[in-house]
Amino acid sequence: MTLQVLFEPEAMNELREARRWYDDEQPGLGGDLLVEVEMNIEHALRWPELAPRLLVPGYRRLRHP
């Protein structure tokens, strides 16, 4: 089974805004944020059973504390 990563449009907009905000605070920090997000996505793809299931069969939600 091939897993896909889907971002809700609102989540993608929030991530873009967060990157800009972090880069305004300190150049390069927004890129660090994206690296962390990508690492968490890779973790979820490697071990999907650790992510909580959603009500829609076959979907899981990744939340980072």
Image (cartoon, grey):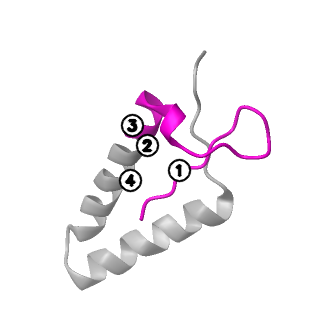
Mark-to-mark CA distance, 4 and 3: 9 Å
Q: Residue at x 53, y 43 (%)?
A: 51
- Residue 17 vertical placement versus 48 (above, below): below
**Cβ atoms at labels 4 and 3 below 8 Å apart:** no
Residue range in magenta is 42-65
Q: Which mark is residue 50?
A: none
Q: Residues within 10 Å of mark 2 (few under 14, many from 20)?
A: some
- Quadrant placement of the N terminus: top right
Q: Earlier in the sequence, mark 1 or mark 4?
A: 4
Marks 2 and 1: in contact by CB < 8 Å? Answer: yes
Q: Amino acid type of disc 4?
A: Val
Residue at numbered disc 4: 37
Residue 17 percent across, percent down from the top left: 47, 74
On the image, numbered disc 1 is attached to which residue?
62
Amino acid identity at mark 1: Leu
Amino acid at pointer 3: Glu
Q: Are marks 2 and 4 in contact (CB under 8 Å)?
A: yes
Q: Earlier in the sequence, mark 3 or mark 1?
A: 3
Circle 1 sits in a helix, a strand or a loop, which is it?
Answer: loop
- In reply to whether residue 48 is colored magenta, the answer given is yes
